[in-house]
Image: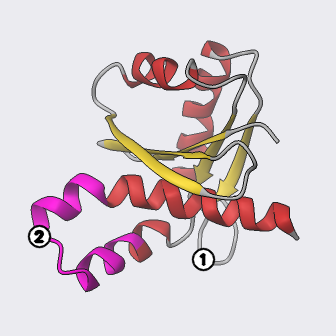
Amino acid sequence: MKRVVALDIGSVRIGVAVSDPLGLFAQGLTVLNAEKDWLAELEKILSQYDEPMILVGLPLRTDGSEGPEAQHIREIAEKIKERFSGLALEFWDERFTTTIAQQTLLQGDVSRAGRKKSVDKIAATLLLESYLESKKR
């Protein structure tokens, strides 16, 4: 299995996680600044792996339908596809990943500043873990 690089895209920050070569585990990598040239940073990350797949979190509504937020993510994904045309890109339901990440950090008694720095990376990791688990079945 190829490595999977997961993106939890927000308006301010983008959490990034990567799978191990066997597709068994997810590891949080970094948080990119969405207000800067994050695609250049993503390119550096992707270049470290042999043709990874890109997994983009899709913010679906609680009933599973797509709203304007999901459409916005699809538009961003088009830019990613254009820039990295040789790589496969898939969407994955990201409902509640950020909420779960925040709750986990709160339970771990992480400071507000610490939560702000790492919540997106953890959300990307949860997104990727969910995807990898579905592939095991």
Identify the secondary structure beneath mark 2.
Answer: loop
Residue lying at 11% horizontally and 70% vertically, measured from the top left: 111
Q: Seen in the image, is 99 located left or right of residue 20?
A: left
Whether residues under marks 2 and 1 lie with C-beta atoms below 8 angstroms apart, the answer is no
Residue 106, quarter of picture: bottom left
Q: Seen in the image, is 115 located left or right of residue 4?
A: left
Q: Is residue 76 above or below residue 48?
A: below
- For the stretch drawn in magenta, the main secondary structure is helix
The reply to whether residue 67 is in sight is: no
Magenta stretch: includes residue 116? yes
Residue 21, quarter of picture: top right
Residue at the disc numbered 1: 62
Task: State which region is magenta.
Answer: 101-118
Q: Residue flagged by tag 1: what amino acid is it?
A: Thr
The reply to whether residue 12 is in sight is: yes
Residue 89, given in percent of the width and then of the height, sits at: 73, 35
Residue lying at 50% horizontally and 73% vertically, measured from the top left: 96
Q: Residue flagged by tag 2: what amino acid is it?
A: Ser
Quadrant assignment for the C terminus: bottom right
Residue 30, given in percent of the width and then of the height, sits at: 37, 41
Residue lying at 47% horizontally and 18% vertically, measured from the top left: 44
Which one is nearer the viewer's eye here, 56 or 48?
48
Residue lying at 29% horizontally and 42% vertically, measured from the top left: 12
Identify the secondary structure beneath mark 1.
Answer: loop
Q: Seen in the image, is 22 located left or right of residue 37?
A: right
Residue at the disc numbered 2: 111
